[in-house]
Amino acid sequence: MSNKGSERFQPRARIIKLLGEQLITDEIIATVELVKNSYDADATKIEIIFDNVNDRENGMITIRDNGIGMSLNTIINAWFQLGTDFKQIQREEHKTTLIYNRPILGEKGVGRFAAQKLGNKIILTTRVSNDELETQVELDWKLFDKNALLSEIPIDWIRTKPTIFKDNSTGTEIEIRDLQKSWDKEMVFRLAQKLQSLQSPFKAKSNFEIIIKSNNYPDIQKEIKYIDEYLDNAIYSLIGNVNEKGEMSAEYTFFLKTFKEYNRKEHFVKKDIKDTEYFNSSRKNPICGKFEFKFYVWDLDHATLEDSIGKKNYDNYIKPFTGIRIYREYFRIWPYGEEGNDWLNLDIRRVNTPYKYLSNNQIVGIVEITNTYNSNLKDKTDREGLIDNIEFRDFKNLVLSAINELEIERRKDKSKIDNLRERKKGRKLNETFDNLEELKNILIKNNCFEKYKNQIENIEKSYNFEIQNIQEPLILKAGIGVAFQMPAHEIQIQLQGLREILESFENDMKRMGLYGRIFDKLNDIKKIIETLDEVSQGALELSRRKLSTFSLESTAKFAEKIKKPELDRANVKIIYDVIDKLSVYGYQNFAITCFLNLIDNSIWWLRRIEKDRLIKVTIKKDINGNASVIFSDNGPGFDPSDLDYLGEAYYTRKINGTGLGLYICKRAMNSNKGKIEFSLYDGNPNYLKGANIILTFEKGVK
């Protein structure tokens, strides 16, 4: 015999207090939720009035709007029902407000908890059109501290002749007493500043006005800082959108009044900015939906800042708004862009390569999403941010990709200005020799070269010593670091030990008469060991620095051998066209370093094509009889605007790249008395239709 039955949850009244504490994190979010309700009610004006709020017990906060108000039916069947899906259904059906066709901001039915966060006693007064009476509801949240069931706590309402919304006016007023805390001027100002940033500064003139009044702090509204007028003076900006395929259309602007002749605009039309490391073969397109963005950037060095808006204006009007904010339907989603909220990790990116990346305090960014196109970018229940789902991660990656495009363009313009101001971050390897030659010519012209000849020769010797004994070894170590991130000597020792163990195990298996699939597995392990052995040998070879005559073909194939595991994983094939069998005299390890970096680059960019990924290595004499190696691939190729900047330290279009690979190649070639050049596909039969890089060894062919 069995008993059956059913029961219902009977929540205690205190669950209201618990939910309020969890769903609304602070007074700022609480006020924002109430402002959103007014926006959804088609209000054009909302007043937030602070009366004697420095006195918690006797102070009062009043929030009043001129929206459509709530009927008694709405109060009973929506406002009194916690977690109602009334607005959520409206959002999902993409419904808009009745008068101004605004998208619905509210979703989770938690607005009444916002009032609880501000104070214990609430008087809500509201009136709708064509209703001769106001409806008033009184709430004392302290009653919900009792151990009674939620259903046992009465909420009284009354219908009276209008005293607040007289004549034909409509709206809702919430009067909050017995405050949760007293408010000083700093708190009121912080709230005022936050509410000023509630709406996107890039929206056209709004028909929704927020007014803040305080008898304690009467000048609070005047002290609010507005950023809009300063954005046009940004040095760099990128304004545009990213579509559902991850393609960016945007306009980049560089503007600095003291260098007007260098000011420029650059347009991008449906440029694929997807990060191929993130959007790989298993999932090539984002699912977050399209969005718009506007990014404004300043350089913070004294000279450049003074040429734009000045440090005082930056500190007062720009700095408080720096960071990347997200807006949905032109309304702010917290906490993105708040002080200390670096949700894109811009500052972390900048630590290792400060000259390439922007910091969070350099950029004012607005990213606009909508309910229609970004419905799966969902708010967390506590209204503090978006749920970290795959759609959000796609969105985050694409926003960072757009910023990367801005950083690339900025680098071009910043380099020019830095050079003009003679504030170069790095010096060209041959610049010292050029200056010395110029000095020699001046001295010869003035018949005094012999007088300073010894000093000049000493300078040349000292510089040559620095290049050969300091800079060149550093280049070599950098090349090893880029190509390998493992201790080669230790790996060689461990591999030999592993090889001996496997051979012993194999002999034991044979003596026991065990054959079959297990031997196939042993062979697979042996192949892995051999591959690791080759890679570690490559690292050791790179560490040996000596002048020698070496074959360019053998050197290129040695680099290919080292990179074979990566080439195989990426399905990239290398083909050779050896027109001339050439050897050169120089540092072979520098040549290997260069070839390794070029292979790395091609592997990365070839991810953008579906199949038949190809690298072509052509070895031939150039028209001057010098030995040349042409590295070509059939990837997306170079952006024409990048050609003048390739090979500069930290310049790269890879989202997480260091920008050192081609720089190391350039320095390695200089150390071998050679050069590196970059070319677009021009029909040359030695080229493929992607990136084409020409290495020329001018030392002489052996």
Image (cartoon, helix red, strand yellow):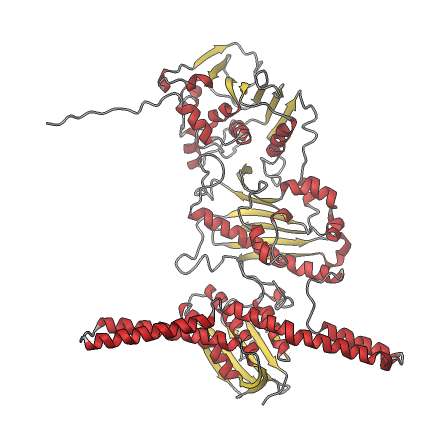
Q: Is residue 612 visible?
A: no
Q: Position of residue 477 (x, y in %)?
A: 56, 70
For the N terminus, the image quarter is top left
Q: Position of residue 199 (x, y in %)?
A: 58, 36
> Looking at the image, which is closer to me, 393 or 209?
393
Check the image and name the residue furthest to the bottom.
Answer: 702
Q: Position of residue 679 (x, y in %)?
A: 59, 73
- How many circles with numbers are drawn on the protein? 0
In this rendering, is residue 431 above or below 224?
below
Q: Is residue 688 left or right of residue 502?
A: right
For the C terminus, the image quarter is bottom right
Q: Is residue 582 visible?
A: yes
Check the image and name the residue furthest to the top.
Answer: 161
Q: Position of residue 77 (x, y in %)?
A: 40, 21
Q: Is residue 316 left or right of residue 151?
A: right
Q: Quadrant of residue 355?
A: bottom right
> Looking at the image, which is closer to me, 173 or 145?
145
In this rendering, is residue 585 above or below 67?
below
> Looking at the image, which is closer to me, 166 or 642?
642
Residue at the image position 68 percent from the left and 35 percent from the top = 225
